[in-house]
Image (cartoon, coloured by chain):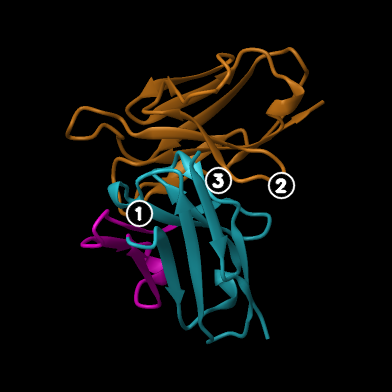
Chain colours: A orange, B cyan
Amino acid sequence: DVVMTQSPLSLPVTLGQPASISCRSSQSLVHSDGNTYLNWFQQRPGQSPRRLIYKVSNRDSGVPDRFSGSGSGTDFTLKISRVEAEDVGVYYCMQGTHWPPFTFGPGTKVDIK
Amino acid sequence: EVQLVESGGGLVQPGGSLRLSCAASGFTFSSYWMSWVRQAPGKGLEWVANIKQDGSEKYYVDSVKGRFTISRDNAKNSLYLQMNSLRAEDTAVYYCARDSTHWGQGTLVTVSS
């Protein structure tokens, strides 16, 4: 199974400042079809997860453009250009290239300093 | 509007059984793979199982193989998870999800004596 790791696991941020979360996979996430199936999810307190980014860098509908995803192979990054209060929550990366099983990272908890 | 509504959770003793349901609306249910994802209290996300549009393919995480069965009824726009031989470590909120873009609100399963 592909193991996903994230760092940091806890990220206190100042409102209006940028934030960055790293995600690494135990093997390349490049699929034989040429796509890289790496997603990012946000889970606000008490809510269900919400997908933000799919295939590394594509924002889902309704996701603010302050969220961006990048990376390739085994190293990926989620960036928030200017953190807002509504961004508090836990962020997960998930790989969908080598399944079953789909595997998630452990999550990064973002809160306000 | 896509809606996924889970039901069937509750308290069950170790070794017991439970059947979860997910009622889908707002999209053509028979056109999508469907998944179950769980989240233990205070923990991260874990993919549990998924099923192809016509039910011909089903996949499971190793920890539930032989104990859980995913199924669907396209005529009723419903997804199911039959859980047998339940263990304390199966305690979690169980989410129904459509291709990781849409998630239900979850239903809590507690396995305890």
Q: Residue at 35%, 46% (x, y): give it.
A: B28
Q: Amino acid at mark 2?
A: Gly
Which residue position holds label 1?
A101
- The residue carrying pointer 1 sits among few (fewer than 14), some (14 to 19) or many (20 or more) residues within 10 Å by Cα, namely many
Query: Is disc 2 in contact with disc 3, using a CB cutoff of under 8 Å?
Result: no
Please indicate whether residue B1 sits to the left or right of residue A99 in the image.
right
Residue type highlighted by circle 1:
Pro
**Eye-nearest disc, 2 or 3:** 2
Same chain assignment for discs 1 and 3: yes
The three-letter code of the residue at mark 3 reads Pro
Label located before the other in sequence (1 or 2): 2
Q: Position of residue B29 (x, y in %)?
A: 36, 50
Image mark count: 3
Q: Which residue is mark 3?
A: A106
Compared to residue B60, the image places residue B45 above or below, namely above
Q: Mark 3 belongs to which subunit?
A: A
Mark 3 element type: loop
Magenta range: B48-74
